[in-house]
Amino acid sequence: MQYHIECGVGGIFRHRDAANGGVAEGGFDWAGLDYDHVDAEAFYLETQTYNLPVVYPGQANVQESVGKLAPEAGYLLTAAFPNLTLDQADQILTETEGPGGGFLDNGSSFGVYSRLNLYAAAGRAAVLASGQSSQAARAIPSSPTGISPHN
């Protein structure tokens, strides 16, 4: 069976070729979807920089605080993980940000958005959110930063 690779909002999917038992013309075979996490992560990392050279060397090896530059960016995670606080989400975005110094990363609040690695941040947020749920059930206090040391 042949597959086509498609990139969509939800990631990278493979679906069956219509000529080989998949979707008829004009339809979409949702049952034939096969999400590929490895391909999705590789695609995300590749398209974060497109392997373009660093144009702002002062930003290249600097971790920027998302909470200071663009505190509203945390809502990108809290919308999907409502158990997270905005501070926790901003910290996750800071810890998982991609390489700096790219053509949009001039040190501004706009530039920090170009460094957000939402793929990695969502993975870490999911672990933290599930840890918070189990911690709440066991009544274990969280660390001072709000991020469990067990994750």
Image: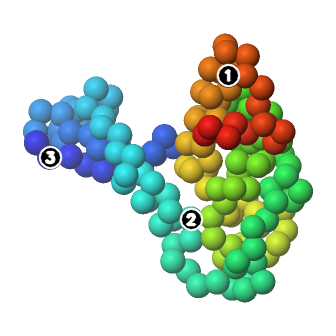
Tell whether 132 sits left or right of 146. Answer: left
Residue 130 image point, x, y percent: 60, 27
Residue at 68%, 73% (x, y): give it. Answer: 100
Where disc 1 sits, the SS reads helix
Residue 64 appears in view: yes
| Residue 135 numbered tag | 1
Using the rendered image of the protein, determine whether residue 122 is visible from the camera's viewpoint: no
Q: Quadrant of the N terminus?
A: top left
* Between 92 and 147, the one nearer to me in the picture: 147
Q: Are marks 3 and 1 in contact (CB under 8 Å)?
A: no
Which quadrant holds the C terminus?
A: top right
The residue that mark 3 highlights is 2
Image x and y of residue 69, in percent? 87, 59
Q: Is residue 96 left or right of residue 109?
A: left
Residue 48: image tag: 2
Image height of 5 relative to 126, above or below = below
Looking at the picture, how far across and down is residue 72, in whole percent? 83, 46
- Give me the residue at 68% from left, 63% from top: 114
- Tag in front: 2 or 1: 1
Query: How far apart are the two marked residues, 2 and 3, measured between alpha carbons?
Result: 29 Å
Task: For label 2, count other residues whose C-alpha is less than 10 Å away and answer few (under 14), some (14-19) or many (20+).
Answer: some
What's the residue type where badge 1 is placed?
Answer: Gln
At label 3, counting other C-alpha atoms closer than 10 Å, the crowd grade (few under 14, some 14-19, many 20 or more) is few
Looking at the image, which residue is at 51% across and 43% down? 9
Q: Which of marks 2 and 3 is nearer the N terminus?
A: 3
